[in-house]
């Protein structure tokens, strides 16, 4: 079962404001987000089939760019719509697939932690002077809702 | 079997120089190192028995401070002595214990990655203007030797 969504108007406003400032460059920030994940945890590259047998540097890998953008946009859009819809807006079939892929790859809590850290660092860089402890907390809450929804399907 | 140690004189000099600048404050840097690990991967706290059922904030936890210092000093001393001794200077009994504790706690490559990232960030902060890409590379090589030695006993 998904946990009830607790997300205040203030949190929603901070997430929307920051997403509006990032979305025109979402591909660029998405790639930075994934490069940050791999800077912290290079071993996690082995979980991505399209990074195997590739001689292209990470930052030039077209498949990584595409994958990063879809993950980043999904996470941000789910955060933006969290209060309005009262739930994590990711298609059920996608959530099921995310659950099984994460389970199959042996993802543990610390993997979600590292992705959260990298996501928050990326949004911090992207939002510049707009960034604040409250904005960090809002994104943190939204991310934890997304993780909880994925974990529901890691069975 | 441990892998043969490859560590140049230049790498050794960089590690010694930076350790000399940190060791009088090793307790302080050790705690920062562990706080960085938990900032990136808070879930990893569950692996440390002395953090369970504790209401003290992490930065005031005396057991964490003691543990952090022993880990930090062990890792740095092993790096400093790596070239001279041609091996990772950690007592065999300690390495065996480290191997079994890491195995029991379900430590995977990404855990070692996060600890490496936090260690390098800490040394970067501690060494200030002395820090360089070459110094980072030297510590990185030394750390990987330590991890390889621990992994030898994760069986």
Image (cartoon, coloured by chain):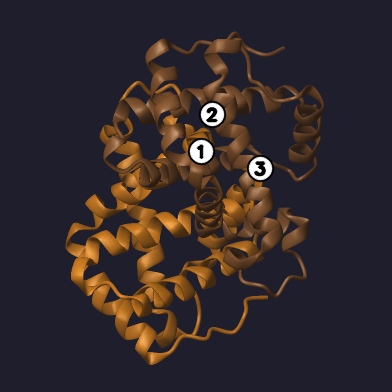
Chain colours: A brown, B orange
Q: Position of residue B68 (x, y in %)?
A: 36, 49
Q: Any mark on residue B28, and which?
A: none
Chain letter of the residue beneath label 2 in the structure image: A
- Where is mark 3, residue-wise? A70
- Which of disc 1 and disc 2 is earlier in sequence? 1
Task: Tell me if residue B106 can be seen.
Answer: no
- Which of disc 2 and disc 3 is earlier in sequence? 3
Task: Tell me if residue B86 can be seen.
Answer: yes
- Where is mark 1, residue-wise? A116
Q: Is residue A108 above or below residue A141?
A: below
The residue that appears at 40% across and 54% down in the rendered structure is B118
The residue that appears at 21% across and 72% down in the rendered structure is B20
Which callout, 3 or 2, points to the residue nearer the camera?
3
Chain letter of the residue beneath label 3 in the structure image: A
CA gap, disc 3 and disc 1: 16 Å
Q: Are marks 3 and 1 in contact (CB under 8 Å)?
A: no
Are callouts 3 and 1 both on one chain? yes
């Amino acid at each position: 079962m998904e946990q009830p969504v607790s997300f205040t108007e203030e949190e929603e406003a901070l997430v929307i404001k920051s997403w509006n400032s990032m979305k025109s460059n979402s591909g660029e920030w998405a790639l930075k987000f994934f490069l940050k994940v791999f800077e912290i945890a290079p071993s996690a590259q082995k979980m991505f089939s399209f990074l195997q047998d590739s001689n292209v540097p990470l930052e030039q890998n077209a498949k990584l760019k595409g994958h990063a953008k879809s993950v980043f946009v999904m996470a941000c859009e789910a955060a933006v719509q969290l209060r309005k819809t009262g739930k994590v807006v990711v298609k059920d079939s996608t959530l099921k697939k995310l659950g099984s892929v994460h389970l199959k790859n042996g993802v543990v809590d610390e993997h979600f932690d590292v992705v959260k850290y990298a996501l928050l660092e990326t949004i911090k860089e992207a939002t510049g002077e707009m960034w604040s402890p409250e904005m960090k907390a809002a994104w943190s809450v939204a991310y934890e809702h997304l993780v909880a929804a994925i974990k529901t399907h890691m069975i």
